[in-house]
Image: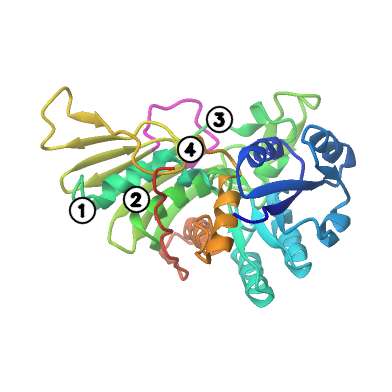
Amino acid sequence: MGEPLRVGIVGAGKISRQYATTLARLPGVALTRVADLAADRASALAADFAGVQAVSVSDLMADDAVDLVLNLTVPRAHAEVALAALAAGKHVYGEKPLAATTLEGRAILDAARAAGRTVGCAPDTVLGTGVQTARAALDAGEIGVPVAATAFMVTPGHERWHPDPEFYYEPGGGPLMDMGPYYLTALVTLLGPVRRVTGLASTPRATRTIGDGPRAGTVFPVRVPTHQTGVLEHAGGALTTIMMSFDVWAGRLPRIEVYGTDGTLSVPDPNHFDGPVEVFTSASASGDGWTRLPERAGYRDAGRGTGVADLAEALRSGAPPRANGELAYHVLDVMECLHTAAETGAAVTVRSTCEVPAPVPLA
């Protein structure tokens, strides 16, 4: 396999420990450095992983012991950190979304191309056995030709549990920009890129209140839509209806369902790597017609950071990484177009496209 891809984390917030734990057990990658504007957070993370040093952000960017910068900063800082890493000659893998705007996202991809470096981006949950098994069923034609799909993500909001939730309600946040990448990346993986969208959005509450942690009771403003609905027209003709909301206390909605000419496919939560995949066909002969499929494809026991290992293997083989920058840019473009559609009341053509990543064999 050769030398592992050496990874430096920038941003030692809540999600960083999940990444560090996954990277510690995966082949082909090695976490070497951690940096955060709050030095104590970087030190606390580094202390729990052998061989990892806490350094400043500038020192991490200049460090020869870092081949790839894992960008776990808040969305408004994604572009700044990614561009600095690329300028320093590093590969980049970022948390979703790729950037706060498509303008920033395109700047990242252009800088990577100029530097001869690779950009990867979350979510990598689509590489797990859940979405990949669903994809294998679709590719095998088990529900015929996909006609439509639905995708629902509803919650009353992250301020109930997150100690510093303000960034979820600032530009670059909101339910669409925060959770949408999981659903849209899964939908593109299953049904192909999106060519046109329409939709509406609302902001029912002007403020939110932190519900947990040392800042509980703090009131802060909401600067983005918190309830978004839309319809996506995929390049293959299928139509997806989506709803992303921070304003729903409870629901009994499916996460993702795909409807075909010969049946229906139930896809597990795309925020997770695994989960039950079920299919209903007109030929089903037992029970209520639903059959749970065995795992057929995807990385088993995957976790946040699996996409980094997939990128490392892609660099060695010369293949494009599956959780790649062009896919993340297209998803960002779709989300931006949904915002535009909500503001204008018109259907919006999505100018970008992408290749659907190669399927993941069961591994």
Magenta stretch: residue 333 in it?
no
Question: Callout 1: few (<14), some (14-19), or many (20+) C-alpha neighbours within 10 Å?
Answer: some
Q: Residue furthest bottom?
A: 114
Tell me if label 1 and label 2 are in contact, CB under 8 Å: no
Secondary element under disc 4, as helix, strand or loop, is loop
Magenta residues: mostly which secondary structure? loop
Of residues 180 and 6, the one nearer the viewer is 6
User: Residue 268's x, y, as percent?
Assistant: 40, 35
Point out which mark residue 156 bears.
3
Q: Please name the amino acid that badge 1 sits on.
A: Val
Q: Earlier in the sequence, mark 1 or mark 2?
A: 1
Q: Earlier in the sequence, mark 3 or mark 4?
A: 3
From the image, state whether disc 2 or disc 3 is nearer to you: 2
Place residue 59 in its image quadrant.
bottom right
Earlier residue among tags 4 and 2: 2
Magenta highlight range = 244-255
Q: Is residue 275 left or right of residue 314?
A: left
The answer to whether the residues at label 3 and label 1 have Cβ atoms under 8 Å apart is no
Where residue 98 sits: x, y (%)?
61, 57
In the displayed structure, 99 sits above or below 279; it is below
The residue at the point 71 percent across, 61 percent down is: 82
